[in-house]
Amino acid sequence: MGCCGSRPKREWKPLEDRSCTDLPWFLLFTLFLVGMCGICGFTIMTGGAARLVFGYDSYGNTCGQRNEPIEGVRLSGLDHTDRKFVFFLDPCNIDIIQRKIKSMALCVSQCPTEELATYHDLKRFAMINGSELCSYELPGHKYPQLPERFEKCPKLPVPESKALPVFNRCTPVDISCYAKFAEAVVTFVSDNSMLNRLIAGVAASKEIIVGLCLLALVLSMILMVIIRYISAVLVWILTALVVLGSLGGTSVLWWLYIDYRMTMNETMTKDLRETEEPIDDMKTIKDHAQGLLIYAVSATVFTGILLLLMLFMRKRVALTIALFHVAGKVFIHLPLLALQPFYTFLALSLFWVYWIMVLLFLGTTGNPEKNEDTGLVEFRLTGALQYMTWYHAVGLIWISEFILACQQMTVAGAVVTYYFTRDKTKLPVTPILSSVLRLVRYHLGTVAKGSFIITLVKIPRLILMYIHNQLKGKENACARCMLKTCICCLWCLEKCLNYLNQNAYAATAINSTNFCTSARDAFMILVENALRVATINTVGDFVLFLGKILIVTCTAFAGVLALNYQRDYTEWVLPLIIVCLFAFLVAHCFLSIFEIVVDVLFLCFAIDTKYNNGTPGREFYMDKALMVTNSFEKSK
């Protein structure tokens, strides 16, 4: 069934029937995954993975194996079975823009284990260890006499180096030559001693950092439970503060305007008495007064609208409090919901590691081409093969969104099961596992379709952001404004679609309908309860934001107390920043789950009140707290 078209009116039947949804989209997503795996297989079969892991020289030979000759490239097709390490003639010649070493590379049998200061040292190293560090066509015993030694031998002195584990690149032990590269990456550090002190502070405080991160984790889990008990006080205090703040701000603006007018009138009268010439600053003074008047009037209008909204939406605020209260009960009955961020983060991390590895494989895959400027051989994707990189980039977005959507569907399925089970003692033993099994068996196609829609919006936004960054300082003001407007509109559209998708997943979990039908049903329910939705999203989101700030503040305070013994500020500021960022990330993950639970509960509540009235045969499914709120709204 498509997204458009009419359908016969039907009632919601929670958890009664279950069937596969959006099967074509599941098949399409499966084919896309096969394509992603095909790219990985292609890079392995064509040697890209081997070249990345084992390394290759500037003539296209892979180190540690026998190679086939490359047409038009001299010194290719060599047997490097005994030469397993990549050695750069000038390892400190780094391209800051491309972030790669521009030096010629050779395959050698051993990295230099000591500094080699002269060409006689190079000869001695080659004779003793059998590892020739100059180009292959130069015999080791003639290094000091050959005229080509200045171009085809390493830059002197050759630093002591060690092979990287797994990747077998000879890397200088003293990394001081990489200082320029480090400065390009860490641009906020201008003093190497400061960088060393910051890193030393992190190393010395690693136990404290781990402890504070665990504290942030525990605080986030505790906050989700105690919000159930403090939600009423918190919401009403917040509402009172917003109203008082608006009234106070408006009063201050009117007081400033009146005071400015009085001062201006006194000044004008005094100046007119002293001189008959026109006052040059009169227009400026009047403009300031006019600006204050506009601000005061605007604040008055805003405050009036806010008071009216609070008056008419006070019943909906009570619903928000009740939903927070029930959400706390959900986490008590389904404690494994709190672990969903861990599973999602683990899945995303594994996929991102895989994606980065395949991207690196692609960087060493393709046809060998000789760079005429440097004379080095580089592997590049040409022709139709270059589209594999774009395919791989789309896969990053779609699969990441798919994983996040699976989390939303899993949470929605568990909450729906909780809500529409009248006797909570008869809940499944593991509602989370039951929800995951339903997702895998019936609704992967729906999740694939919803995540693809988000991908279609996110890709053009990312492209526009890239264009905006590339043209920074070159485009005119009009073009810059248009680009920013388009980016902002796409961002807003993405947020709206994310919210609609989340409710569509909940509708699918309830009725087992396809994505378009579920999105349409959920949208109609949300439109019918627009004021309730607005209240929950404004008051509820702000309360959860305050919860995130509370967790970060408490963690930071504990961090200051724990790191206080380090008297030097520069030694504990970086650990504190790391802890605060981690605390905000953890709080955001956990409270985002709480937000999803609240949104799904509201959709279930709206459906419950629409199709049930409490009479025999049409009893409510809702919690007693929601029943009281529902009765309160009807009585008003």
Image (cartoon, rainbow, N blue to C red):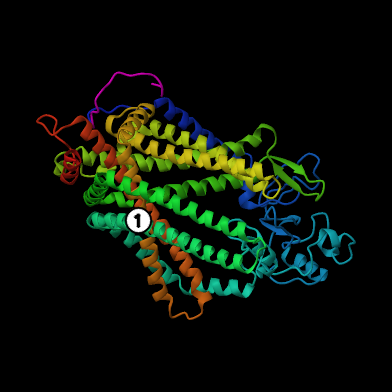
Which quarter of the rendering shows the N terminus? top left
Q: Does the magenta stretch include residue 6?
A: yes
Q: What stretch is highlighted in magenta?
A: 1-14
Residue bearing the label numbered 1: 242
Q: Where is residue 440 in the image (x, y as percent from the top left)?
A: 35, 35
The residue carrying pointer 1 sits among few (fewer than 14), some (14 to 19) or many (20 or more) residues within 10 Å by Cα, namely some
From the viewer's perspective, is residue 454 above or below residue 115?
Answer: above
Q: Is residue 582 left or right of residue 473?
A: left
Q: Where is residue 441 in the image (x, y as percent from the top left)?
A: 33, 33
Question: Which quadrant of the structure image shows residue 131?
Answer: bottom right
In this view of the protein, which residue sits in the foreground, 432 or 72?
432
In this view of the protein, which residue sits in the foreground, 9 or 62?
9
Q: Which residue is drawn at 81% across and 40% down?
A: 72
Q: Where is residue 60 in the image (x, y as percent from the top left)?
A: 73, 46
Q: What residue type is labelled 1?
A: Val
Q: Extreme left residue here?
A: 616
Q: Which residue is drawn at 35% across and 34% down?
A: 504
Q: Which residue is drawn at 36% across and 62% down?
A: 551
Q: Does the magenta stretch include residue 187?
A: no
Which quarter of the rendering shows the C terminus? top left
From the viewer's perspective, is residue 274 above or below residue 27?
Answer: below
Question: Which quadrant of the structure image shows residue 429?
Answer: top left
- Main SS, magenta region, reads loop
Q: Residue at x 28, y 41 (%)?
A: 602
Helix, strand or loop status at disc 1: helix
Question: Which quadrant of the structure image shows residue 254?
Answer: bottom left
Q: Is residue 83 left or right of residue 616?
A: right
